[in-house]
Image (cartoon, rainbow, N blue to C red):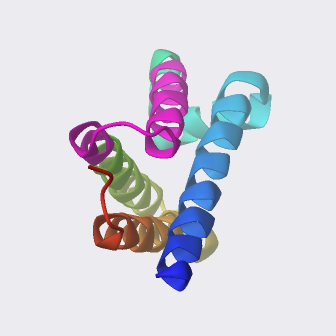
Amino acid sequence: MKTLKITYWVTTSIIALMMAYSTYAYLAQPAVAQAFVHLGFPSYFRVELAIAKLIGAVLILAPLSSKIKEWAYAGFTITFISAFIAHTASGDPVSARAMPVIFLALLAVSYYTYNKLPKAA
């Protein structure tokens, strides 16, 4: 049980930290804004995605109902799959395409372990 809990918190923390950092990068780094242009996305989408990622990071860490967490996990799943598709379609190198897949795998481990943990009554 202890290993399960540690695995959950490590993977969930990595995801939340990455999403919080990407929120900062989306809003403050001109290179990231240019990357969105390269991918063919409008500038407002970058801001919307930053806000959604920050909300999702808070939701997967907060002690909330499992229904709310399910929505956060679903949103991140869609985000990572969409990022992989966008990088692939724009012809980006394998390293850019691999990162969303790696984070999707971490998210899957976090989700799996979350559902295996005993729920508070």
Out of 16 and 47, give the one closest to the viewer: 16
Out of 47 and 5, give the one closest to the viewer: 5
User: In x, y percent, where is residue 41?
Assistant: 44, 31
User: In x, y percent, where is residue 6?
Assistant: 59, 74
Residue at 72% across, 30% down: 24
Out of 94 and 117, give the one closest to the viewer: 117
Assess whether residue 24 is covered by the magenta stretch.
no
Q: In this rendering, does residue 79 appear at all?
A: yes
Residue at the far top in the pictured view: 44
Q: Which of the 4 image quarters holds residue 27?
A: top right
Residue at the far left in the pictured view: 67
Q: Quick check: 41 left or right of 32? A: left
User: In x, y percent, where is residue 62?
Assistant: 49, 38
58 w.r.t. 105: above or below: above
Q: Quick check: 67 left or right of 10? A: left
90 w.r.t. 36: above or below: below
11 w.r.t. 21: above or below: below
User: In x, y percent, where is residue 11?
Assistant: 56, 67
Out of 75 and 68, give the one closest to the viewer: 68
Residue at 78% across, 30% down: 29
Residue at 44% across, 40% down: 63
Q: Magenta segment range?
A: 46-71
